[in-house]
Amino acid sequence: MPAAQVPSVAGHGDGARCASVWRWSGVKAADADHTSTRADHRPSLGGALLTTSGLTKSFRGFTAVNGVDLQVREGSVHALVGPNGAGKTTLFNLLTGFLAPSSGTVTLAGQDVTGLPPEKMAHLGVARSFQITSLFDQLTATEHLELALQSSTGQGLKFWRSDVLMGRFADRSAELLEEVGLSDQAHEPAGALAYGRKRALELAIALALEPRLLLLDEPTAGMGIEDVSRTIELVRRVAVGRTVVFVDHNMHVVGSLADQVTVLQQGRVLAEGPYDAVRTDPRVITAYLGEEQDD
């Protein structure tokens, strides 16, 4: 499992459940008040780190991503939202090299990276989570991170059985586990970790790459309320000094974390801007009220 390919779990419920969490106009006042503090302690944002121009991906006549122009500022937390089939995962795959675009460009820090394979994107500092978990149940949290750190050096598993060489990564593994709140379970096998802690370990594996750009695909999917709250705080911490792009259907999560929100519908950008502006955009409300009625 390359350090850049950090899996996630299945998304939030489909159909009616998806529509119900997308009632933009029904966000509680308490949630709206909470979102006003999301960027209070973040440093000033820089220029564009990631941009796309006319990014398009078609599959046998079906256009999943259609002419997307996206700009992600360095140091920002940028949310991609939209209903099922909006093109979010396909866009993630285009940004990280798992798919080549049919047309358009992807630029990272001024460098054209269109169509570069995932391993080259990883070396450029792009790490990404997935919707399907693939931790090794028998390996401990520390062992997962040691493998990820070794992979990030380009050595792969060549020296897996060398305790001396693997020991080089012990200090950094401990730092990463502390950063994501897993120090107390460093030597627990992944299979014994609670669900929320497995997700924290997956995030630590992504951080092992020292990414400048971190893409998280539904980081709170399938979590209970307490785990969602812990994950929000965790993403806030790891976002300091990094650029984060994430997908989530939970509007409380989006409002709590995002500096900027891009709404996708049928592969196109429907709306973009700060969360408080986007959630009251008539186009967005109409789109998701329509989806709810269809369901």
Image (tube, helix red, strand yellow):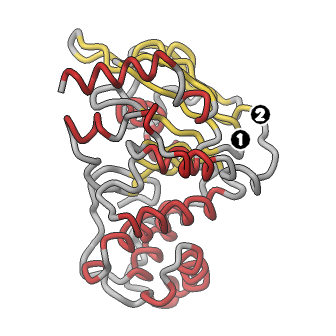
Residue 213, can we see it? no
* Near-viewer residue (143 or 128): 128
Name which residue lies at 45% across and 43% down.
251
Amino acid at circle 2: Gly
Q: Judging from the image, what secondary structure is the residue with disc 2 in?
A: loop
Q: Is residue 11 above or below residue 194?
A: above
Amino acid at circle 1: Glu
Q: Residues within 10 Å of mark 2 (few under 14, many from 20)?
A: few
Labels 1 & 2 near each other (Cβ < 8 A):
yes
Quadrant holding the C terminus: top left
Residue ID for mark 1: 74
Q: Judging from the image, what secondary structure is the residue with disc 1 in?
A: loop
Q: Earlier in the sequence, mark 1 or mark 2?
A: 2
Q: Residues within 10 Å of mark 1 (few under 14, many from 20)?
A: many
Q: Is residue 87 above or below residue 77?
A: above
Q: Position of residue 182 (x, y in %)?
A: 48, 81
Q: Position of residue 43 (x, y in %)?
A: 80, 51
Q: Position of residue 162 (x, y in %)?
A: 43, 86
Name which residue lies at 43% across and 23% down.
285
Taking the image as shown, residue 44 lies to the left or right of residue 18, namely: right
Task: Place residue 136 in its image quadrant.
Answer: bottom left
Q: Position of residue 207 (x, y in %)?
A: 55, 63
Residue ID for mark 2: 47
